Structures are given as C-alpha cells and as structure tokens.
Image (cartoon, rainbow, N blue to C red):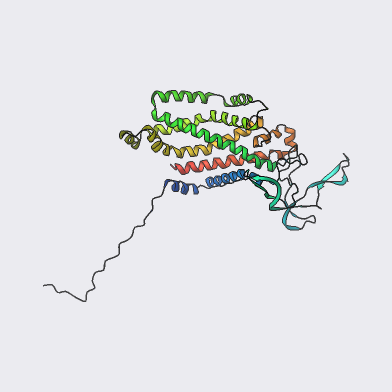
Amino acid sequence: MLAFDSSATPPTTEPAIKKPSHGSESYLALVWRRLRRSWTGMAGLVLVGLLILMAIFADFFAPMDPKATDVGFAPPQIMSFHDKDGGFVFQPRVYALSDSEELDPVTFQPIVGMDYDNPRLLGFFVKGAEYNLLGLIPANRHFFGSTDGQPVHFLGTDKFGRDVLSRAIIGSRISLTIALTVVFIVTIIGTTVGMVSGYFGGSFDVWVQRFVELVLAFPQLPLYLALTSLIPVTAPTNVFLAFVIAVMSALGWAQMSREVRGKTLALARIDYVRAAMAVGATDTRIILQHIFPNVMSHVIVAVTLAIPSVVLLESFLGFLGFAVKPPLISWGLMLQDTATYSVIGSYPWILSPVAFVLVTVFAFNALGDGLRDAVDPY
C-alpha cells in the first residue's frame, strides 16, 4: 500500500503563457503605416498640404495686394539682419532702392543704391492691404511683411510694378482649382465608364472601347487651341474658365477609363464576385459594393499622378494665352511676361512662377509614388 507523504510540496500549476494579442489592422491603417516609411511620400504629403493651405488662405499669405503697382521690373529685395553700419540685429529688414546724389560718369544718370537710412522692418502677422478672408470675413492681417505697411518685393515686380510673390500666391488658387476640378470630373467619368464597360463586357464593352480610342486619338494640343479660340475675347472670365475646364475634362477621362476597365476585367472573375452573381445580386450592387472599393486604391494613385499633368497643361495654355484671362491670376498667365529672351535676360526674377509649378509637380508626384508603393507593395 502506498504511503502518502504529507511533507511533500503539492504540485503547482504554472500560469498559462499569454500570447500577444494583435488587433486587426484596417486597410487604411496599413496603407498609412507603409506610407510613413517612404520619406518622399511623406515629403510630398506635407508639401501638398502646404500648397492647399496656401491656396485657401492666399490673401493672408500674400504680403501685398497683387493688383497694387509700384516700380516696374524692380529687383527682389533681400532680407537682411544687419544695419547700415554692418552690425547684427535680431529683427529682419529690407532696404529699398533709391537714387543717390552721385551720377554715373558715362550716362550721367543717378546711381541707384540701397537706402540704408530708411530700413523697412519685417514681422509676422502685420497689417497691410485689406481683403476678405475666405471671401466673407474682412481682414487686413498678413502672414509676413513690413511692419509699417510699406511695399516689400521679395521676388521683385513685373512690368506693371505688381508684386511677383503676391501674384504667385494668389495665382495658386486658380491653378490648383482648375487642376483639382478637372481631375475630379475626369475621375468621376473615367471610373464610371471603366467599371461599367469592364463589368458588362461583350459587344457593349467593344463599342465603348472604340469610342474611348477615338477620344484618345485626338491630337490634344491643336484641339485645345481650336476649342478655346471659339470663346470670344469679350466673354466673361467665369465663362471662359468654365469652358477651359470642360474642354480639359472632355479630353482627359479616356485614359482613366482604360486603366479602371483593366482592373475591373480582373476583378469580375474573382470568386466573391461570381458568388454574388450566383445568389442573385443586382449588377448595380456588385459594381458599387464589390468592384468599386477594390479599384479605389488604383484611382487614388492615378488622381495624385494626374494633377501635375493638369497643372503643367494649364501653365502651358496660360503661357499661350488660352487658359485664364485677366483680371484672374494664374501661374501660366504670369509666365506670359517671359515671352521674350530680352526680358528673361534682364529680369530673371520674372521666372519665379516656374518654381511654384515645379514644387507642385514634385509634391503630387512624390505623394503619388508613395501611395502607389503603400497601396500595392508587391
């Protein structure tokens, strides 16, 4: 008979090892985590955010009234942290150009130099030209400028003496509005036509694709110039702008349609789409509930890559005088002043709007590349 040892330590049950619980990560969270790893994508996202913020509050960020005139073709005023004696000062300032008492020995014209006796102090949130914030709220505060309200030209002036920096900031509103509006219309039309054509297939898809190929076959630049020439010069600015947006949208949706159709053809053969067909789901429900969410990732990337193309197209057409008419301001319209080599050689700061176009194109392209890698890392 076995004896029971009371002094023996009873066996202890070891605590169960808890497995780390990983919460289910949504698709958007996964895309955001991948996007954060791309420094170019994050740089593009930050720049796009700053550009949109600048366009919305353009009047606040513009240091001067874009319609105010001063000395024509005045060079940029460089910000300085030194006084007239060369000493360092904490408050930045600029020195305006003025005629000195000395004469040029050849032309006998007054020598132009810096007016060190009357510095223009700079600061943030200074008072300046009055405007309506968001078109509703009267205001006169500007993000940066001279504290005494004197004109300051950080990028110089154009031939009429208007501040180039202020006009470029205000022009971002029109240029980005045109680009975003055109891409929005193109996305709606192209996505709808592409999904419907790819889903139904058959003879319907054949005829739709022949029409898409007909639109893609048009030489776009001559057609842009011909269609915009139909609007008389005396037409209202809003009518001309709406016509340009309509022309760009009518010629730009076809490529988006072809891309979405290709994605739809692949999705229409997936098991869950065939299962939805088998249980009697309507075509509208299948397109909206099953196909549309799966093509949205491609559409978002295509949108970010299409915006720079529209910005470049608007700048080119504006340079030729077929996009925006005064008194509206856009980057392409500002580039009309660079039509002659003599102006570019003598006043190179007139090319400043090109920098805004390049930054915009880089920002949206970088964001599009980052989103493309985040949406489909393989």
The residue positioned farthest toward the bottom in the image shown: 7
Number of numbered discs on residues: 0
Q: Say left or right for 119 vs 277.
A: right
Residue 112 in percent (x, y) is at: 82, 44
- 117 over 368 or under it: above or below: below
The residue positioned farthest toward the left in the image shown: 1
Q: Quadrant of the N terminus?
A: bottom left
Hey, which quadrant is residue 288 in on the image? top left
Q: Quadrant of the C terminus?
A: top left
For image coordinates 60% across by 26% down, the residue present is: 224
The foreground one among 104 and 334 is 334
Q: Say left or right for 305 vs 196.
A: right
Hey, which quadrant is residue 247 in on the image? top right
The foreground one among 189 and 86 is 189
The foreground one among 149 and 315 is 149
Q: Say left or right for 34 vs 324.
A: left
Residue 55 in percent (x, y) is at: 61, 43
Q: Say left or right for 328 vs 21.
A: right
Residue 101 in percent (x, y) is at: 88, 47
